Amino acid sequence: ACTYCVNEEVGIKKQETRNKTEGLKWLELGELILKLNQFLKLETVRLTGGEPTLYHDLVPLIKYLKANEIPAVKITTNGFLLKNLISKLQKEDLHSINVSLDALDEDIFFRISKRRSVSRIIEGIDAALEKDIPVKLNAVIIKGVNENQILPLLEFAATKKVAIRFLELMNMGHIHDADQKAIFTEDEILNVIKAKYDITSLPRKPGATANYWQTSSGQVFGIIANESSPFCGDCNRLRLDSYGNIYGCLSSNEPIAIADSALGQKELREKLQNALAQKQAIKFKGSKLSMLEIGG
């Protein structure tokens, strides 16, 4: 329900879609991922959303993927249900967890997420760390809303000994083509941090979405800067939605259906090539498609 992904119109549309048709069953999704893996030799499968911990068959899906030699299975979650799930996730050898946490201040957090109880998310983070599951924090920074949370979040991450990534607002869904004054840029984020800490730039890994730095105290942080520092040139990601459509890029509204069981290897290869052709050469353009529909 975060405001950068959902407004009233998007919420109503998603509910109408859900009422008309169900997505694929977990085993169908798993089989489809393995079918793609024959061509792609996947290094990682990340389960996102929406909110993946609301998916009743999350654990069986993870177990199936790990049993079929997907090297790393990860999730991105809002953390609300994490504490109660963590033992099951550990049992299935979940590789790592990204937790979205846009503010530590309760009022600011509620303004963004429409939910309360930051403490509940922190309990989920602690539970994961206690089970030795690596955690990263994600924080979307919105100008005029939560830029005053950058240092508290950075220092909170340091107390937990986890990395944090700050995200520029993405030009997606209901904010596509809207006034972009809400974007708090990479330089602005760095200036906030440099006002208190000396920082050193770290080498960027090929295909990485974030640029990383380290503070003089040793805390690592990244910035995912779709606008300021696009990473389209070596993007190596592919998205699969819950209805069996693939997308090569968040900037594309064109789903490519691959769920048909009669689809042969030649046809699947062609569809994969079409999806990869959706990738942007240089600049992230965004899309009117909500992240709820394409996967966060």
Image (spheres, rainbow, N blue to C red):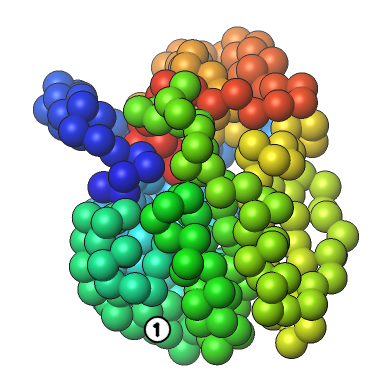
User: How many dots with numbers?
Assistant: 1
Residue sitting at x 69%, y 73%? 195
Vertical placement of 225 versus 270: above or below? below
Q: In the image, residue 72 lies at what x, y percent?
A: 61, 58
Q: Few, some or many C-alpha atoms within 10 Å of disc 1 (few <14, some 14-19, many ≥20)?
A: some
Q: Quadrant of residue 248?
A: top right
Q: Is residue 120 visible?
A: yes
Q: In the image, residue 228 lies at what x, y percent?
A: 70, 40
Q: In the image, residue 247 lies at what x, y percent?
A: 54, 25
Residue sitting at x 56%, y 82%? 155
- Near-viewer residue (227 or 14): 227
- Near-viewer residue (223 or 206): 223
**Tag 1: amino acid:** Ala
Label 1 secondary element: helix
* Left or right: residue 246 compared with residue 42: left
Check disc 1 and report the residue beneath it.
127
- Near-viewer residue (261 or 259): 259
Q: In the image, residue 221 lies at what x, y percent?
A: 67, 68
